[in-house]
Image: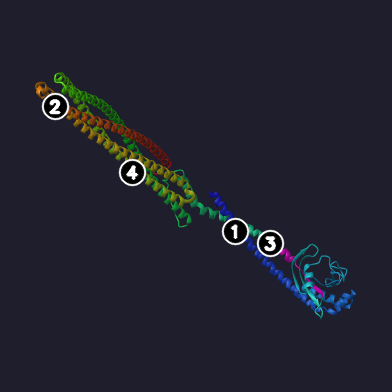
Amino acid sequence: MLKSLQTRLILTLSIILLASGIGMSYYTYSTSQRVVIESIGKQAQTIANAAAELVDPRQYEELKETMQMNDYYNDLQQQLYQLKQSNGLKYLYTMSVAEDGSVYYVVDGSALDQNSDDFSALGEVEQELDELVQLAFSSKQSQLGVLDYAEAYGATISAYTPILNDAGEMVGVIGADFDATDIYEHLASNRLTTIIIIAATLIVSIILVYAITRWMLSPLRSLLKTMKLVQSGDLTVQLSSKGSDEIAALSGAFAALTSELRSTLVKLSASQTVIKQSITTLSSNIVSADHLGEQLSQHIELADKQFSIQHQAQGETTQAMRETASGMTHVTETAERMLSAASHATALSVSGNESMAELQEQMGEIQLSSKKVMEDLLALQNLSQDIQDIVSLIKQIAAQTSMLALNASIEAARAGEQGRGFSVVAQEVRKLADQSDQAATQVEQLIEHMLSLSTGANEASRLSIEEVDTGVTAVSAAGEIFNRIGNEINSVQQQASQLSATSLQINTSIHHLDKLTEDASQLSEEAMHATKEVKKNIMVQYDSVQQMKEMAELLSEQSAELEGLLSRFKLS
């Protein structure tokens, strides 16, 4: 490209110099030719005017009518011959127009010998008629010719003057021809000399233009060499900008652009390192969250099983209470069966007390499991908050990367054609930054959804704990009632007289216990439902964590791609 520019400069300047030389030479040559021709032509015209003064129009018209040579013809020929000889003319003659429009000679002052080849006899028609002769006849005005060359007559300069009678009518034309052969040859010689001078000037000009353009384009070659190094990825090059011309300004601007691009890529490399570290931390936190979710799911499944066992035990307890109530009804009907029913009630009371103790123990375990679930949910919320902070950091880094890429695009646009490669890199970097920002936004949305689910699960766990506490209290009350039933039965055995009142009190207590058992069963069902909801939320959270893992992998791939782009450049 540089050689092509130098060739174009040499060609353009040479054409300008050649055109200027040709123009000046042509102007000088044509001016000198015109001056010479006008000078000689005016001299010929002056002689023709003087010859016209010698012509007697009346006798000239008679000569035309008779077409016979007479004394006037001889006198006029002598006068024209002397005038021609004294002024160095080649030809001096008179001409007239016939009725058919042809032009013929009347008096020729070329030679006294009428048999000469240069002599034109009276009435001889001119076969090669000059346009100036016709113009002189038609306009009745003097005409001055130009330098003309013909094989028959050589180089001549002609002038024509009309011959007018007293009435102002034109009766003929006097023609005066100067021999311009020497002038013609001299002008031809000057033309050849001018061409030689132009050729020599062109050769010298091409040499000077070549030297000047080579000197002028030397800084441009150096700049191009540096640009090729930058294009290959080496941003450590140093470019000196000596002078104050446009090329030096261009070199300075390119050096500033290269420096700014190097600084931008250094910052981008640092940002990429931070992104890579953040992605590593995010992946580690996601793995921890995944492990914690699995543990939490296991605890939820265990709590679900415990709630099922509790619900079954409560069903059995309710059935036992109803059977006890039926037995106490029979006790009140007959006193004879009181001892047997009391014994049976005692056995049922002992069994119920054992069942209540077992149920109380199970409720305690469910309470501990629910608290463990709540603690795991709180830990998951804290971990999600840490992940959200990391995602915010990634979004800030992506925004900063996008801004740096935008600045690089602007600087590349200022560089024009030479900055096209930097513009492509800046666009790719900006695209990666936008993708990172989008991925971080999706991760942030997933984390917010996970936090929302965790908050709901936490609230459900809290309610479950409260309901379990209520169930524990109810079971404790039921155990106390069973103890009371045992004491009452013993008292029935000891005091038969108080059988009726004791039976009614036991029946009332059994109905109350049945109600408490039904409440405990309902609470157990609600706890099971809450546990299933928590398990469902945990599965949704697990899916969110898996999506976060995919996003982290995508960010890792984009970080690797960005690192590959940055590896193309040599920054230090």
Q: Residues at badges 1 and 2 in contact (C-beta under 8 Å)?
A: no
CA–CA distance in space, label 4 to label 2: 63 Å
Q: Amino acid at mark 3?
A: Arg
Among numbered discs 3 and 2, the one appearing first in the sequence: 3
Residue under circle 3?
A: 191
Q: Position of residue 359 (x, y in %)?
A: 21, 26
Which of the 4 image quarters holds residue 151? bottom right
Magenta residues span 171-187
Among numbered discs 3 and 1, the one appearing first in the sequence: 1
Residue under circle 4?
A: 392
Among numbered discs 4 and 1, the one appearing first in the sequence: 1
Label 3: element kind: helix
Q: Amino acid at mark 4?
A: Ser
Q: Position of residue 523 (x, y in %)?
A: 25, 32
Q: Residues at badges 3 and 1 in contact (C-beta under 8 Å)?
A: no
Q: Which of the two marks, 1 or 2, is nearer to us in this view?
A: 2
Where 408 falls versus 126 (above or below)?
Answer: above
Residue under circle 1?
A: 16
Among numbered discs 1 and 2, the one appearing first in the sequence: 1
Among numbered discs 4 and 3, the one appearing first in the sequence: 3
Residue 395 visible here:
yes
